[in-house]
Image: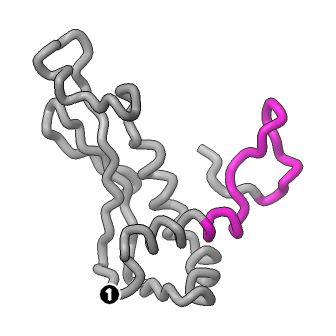
Amino acid sequence: MTIENKDISHKENDLQIGFTVDEMTTRVEAQLRGMGLVKNFAPLVYIVAHGSSSANNPHHGAHDCGACSGRPGSVNARVFAAMANHPKVRTQLEEKGISIPSTTMFIGAMHDTAADRMEYYDE
């Protein structure tokens, strides 16, 4: 999985691969401000997506998410955590008034809503 784009000419199917540091900073800042998480960071911050393992089970299927067409957000949580942990992103966030301590680690996770199970990424 490529998250950081170090050369904007790096493309696949005419689409940029990954995000530049500026793009990562913009996304992380917007999300943190949207959540109201701009100070008093805990040592661990879990970014939890949801998904479901309910294939061919109508009872568990009721726990699927209609808004996302049943697609899990696990990749989004994992990518956001990686961007929020990026040293250059943290430097730029500091300049924008969001100071994340070096002792704070973001960890992506997914809650399987059908099995009520958590899976953690990049621990």
Above or below, 68 relative to 80:
above
At 19% across and 36% down in the image, what residue appears? Answer: 113
Q: Which residues are magenta?
A: 6-26
Element on which disc 1 rests: loop
Picture quadrant of residue 44 = bottom left
Viewport quadrant of the C terminus: bottom left
Q: Magenta stretch: residue 13 in it?
A: yes
In-image side of 59 versus 97 (left or right)? left
Q: Residue furthest right?
A: 9
Q: Position of residue 57 (x, y in %)?
A: 17, 13
Q: Magenta stretch: residue 51 in it?
A: no
Q: Position of residue 61 (x, y in %)?
A: 20, 20
Q: Residue beneath label 1, please? A: 40
Q: Position of residue 108 (x, y in %)?
A: 38, 55
The total number of labels drawn is: 1
Picture quadrant of residue 55 = top left
At 30% across and 79% down in the image, what residue appears? Answer: 43
